[in-house]
Image: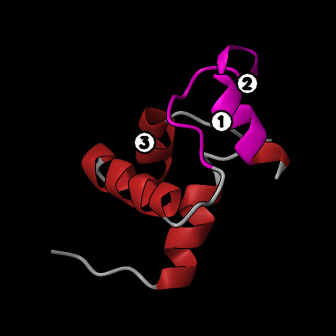
Amino acid sequence: MASYPQEFKEQTVCKMMPPNARSVAKVSRETGISEATLYHWRNQYQEEGKAVPADSSTPESWNGENKLAVII
């Protein structure tokens, strides 16, 4: 199993955050990291209270909780 530096994880998760909001599938193709790993990293950041929308759709379709998280 590959080990990635924390800074690399943060940069990769940032690609899935606003304003970029790229899908997990797209980031997986760009980085070569499995979608399962990216979902895991994203979930870790969400548990830490960081603004990472749970879905990969456009910001207009996010629920109120995700929109508020981005604003905060």
Residue type beneath disc 2: Pro
Q: Where residue 40 sits in the image (x, y, percent)?
A: 33, 55
Which numbered disc flags the more N-terminal residue, 1 or 2? 2
Identify the residue position indicated by label 1 in the image: 66
Q: Is residue 50 above or below residue 57?
A: below
Image quadrant for the N terminus? bottom left
Q: Please identify the quarter of the rendering in which residue 56 is found.
A: top right
Highlighted magenta segment, given as a residue range: 52-69
Q: Nearer the viewer, mark 1 or mark 3?
A: 1
Residue at the spot of label 2? 59
Residue 33 magenta-drawn? no
Which amino acid type is shown beneath numbered disc 3?
Arg
Q: Residue furthest left?
A: 1
Q: Is residue 32 visible?
A: no
Residue occupied by mark 3? 29
First along the sequence among labels 1 and 3: 3
Where disc 1 sits, the SS reads helix
In this rendering, position of residue 7 left or right of residue 18 = left
